[in-house]
Image (cartoon, grey):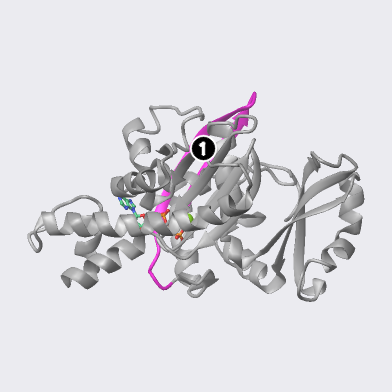
Amino acid sequence: MFSGKKELLGVDIGTSSIKVVALSESKGVFHLEGLGSVPLPPEAIVDNSIMDAVAITDALTGVLESLKLKHKGAATSVAGHSVIIRKIQLPLMAEEELESQLQFEAEQYIPFDVADVYIDFQILGPDAKDPSQMNVILVAAKRDFIEDYQALFGDAGLQLRVLDIDCFAVENMMEVNYGFLEDEIVALVDVGASSVSVNILKGGESVFTRDIQAGGNYINEELQKRLGLSSDVAELLKLGQESDEVEMETAEAILKESAMSLAQDVQRSLDFFTATAGDDKIQKVYLVGGASKMPQLKAGMEERMGVPVEVADPFRGLAVNEKNFDPEYLEVVGPDFGVAVGLATRRVGDK
Ligand SMILES: Nc1ncnc2c1ncn2[C@@H]1O[C@H](COP(=O)(O)OP(=O)(O)OP(=O)(O)O)[C@@H](O)[C@H]1O
Ligand SMILES: [Mg+2]
């Protein structure tokens, strides 16, 4: 949503932690320059709103200091429901022309005064059925919402240059690491602590996005509620570790059952696409996000959907110096960085 030109730090502010990634690009290859994460207190972000800006700024400042990076600009993203996203059709026109008409075009699609909102767009290309028209994604967010994020980054010594949406950041990460086949229909699903974002692509073009309130926290809540455990013990069990406080068999049964229920929530949101997509069927699901590391979730989704489900590796296509980054560590933390890697591929002013 902002403009200029330089490498940006990818900063994913999730409800459970901040993830930071730095990439450099040479000859079309992205090189991993730095990565780090830092947990956030549970009340720092609630329902996509910044509740404790000081806690977030402190955490961000801490991780930036430990990484010793020189970046001045950052790219971040928010959940899809904090912004308005519309796919619209307009007569073919140049990007500059659309830019000058944007306020006017946007008025028809935005339910509040356009003076109060930032508007951005992405031209997807000519329409397949009517080549005189082009498909455009219009994105709008309230000014004060964006200003909160700008202030937060400013306090951490960074300038916020790109504000993306989580599911598009995951799409950029997949483009760099996997690429998309023509006509292939894939679902990208980011399973975080408190939200799940879904982005369905056909031939590499986003055709359906959705955010649901679900995620890893739900598993902890189930374990805590049903076994009377503290949140720390519940987290350990979820990560596959043992505890003297409970029978492992009992814990495993609850993990399996609650992962299945989470898989069902995800499937239900994918069903909204299937219901309107004619003959189009999802052929493969890629998972990212910390909670995608639960083996029970991948198994549950495969069972319910009957298509292959793969946990994506956000570092797969990057050049990584093994002297600086332990491959085993990258494998373990990989899915956590799905959004942050996508953000770090962004350049100021690119569309
Ligand atoms: N190995 C693991 N097995 C199961 N769950 C895990 C594992 N590692 C992390 N998680 C869970 O993943 C979640 C954190 O994932 P992530 O970092 O993607 O969330 P977030 O971006 O902070 O949250 P959100 O996107 O919902 O705001 C937590 O619920 C955490 O317990
Ligand atoms: Mg997240």
Q: Is residue 103 magenta?
A: no
247 over 113 or under it: above or below:
above
Q: Is residue 35 magenta?
A: yes
Task: Name the dominant secondary structure of the magenta segment.
Answer: strand
Q: Nearer the viewer, residue 185 or 217?
A: 185
Decide if residue 105 is on the left or right side of residue 122: right
Decide if residue 92 is on the left or right side of residue 162: right
Q: Residue at x 81, y 42 (%)?
A: 127
Q: Residue 24 placed where, x, y %?
A: 58, 34
Q: Nearer the viewer, residue 299 or 274?
A: 274
Q: SS of the residue at dot 1? A: loop
147 over 102 or under it: above or below:
below
Residue 83 at least partly seen = yes
Look at the image and give the residue range highlighted in magenta.
18-43
Residue 157 at least partly seen = no
Q: Residue at x 40, y 64 (%)?
A: 40
Q: Quadrant of the N terminus?
A: bottom right
53 over 128 or under it: above or below:
below
Q: Residue at x 68, y 73 (%)?
A: 144
Q: Residue 259 placed where, x, y %?
A: 31, 55
Q: Nearer the viewer, residue 74 or 67?
A: 74
Report the number of discs: 1
Residue of label 1: 283
Decide if residue 20 is on the left or right side of residue 247: right
Kind of residue sitting beneath label 1: Gln
How many neighbours does mark 1 have within 10 angstroms: few (below 14), some (14-19), or many (20 or more)?
some
Q: Nearer the viewer, residue 282 or 67?
A: 282
Q: Quadrant of the C terminus?
A: top right
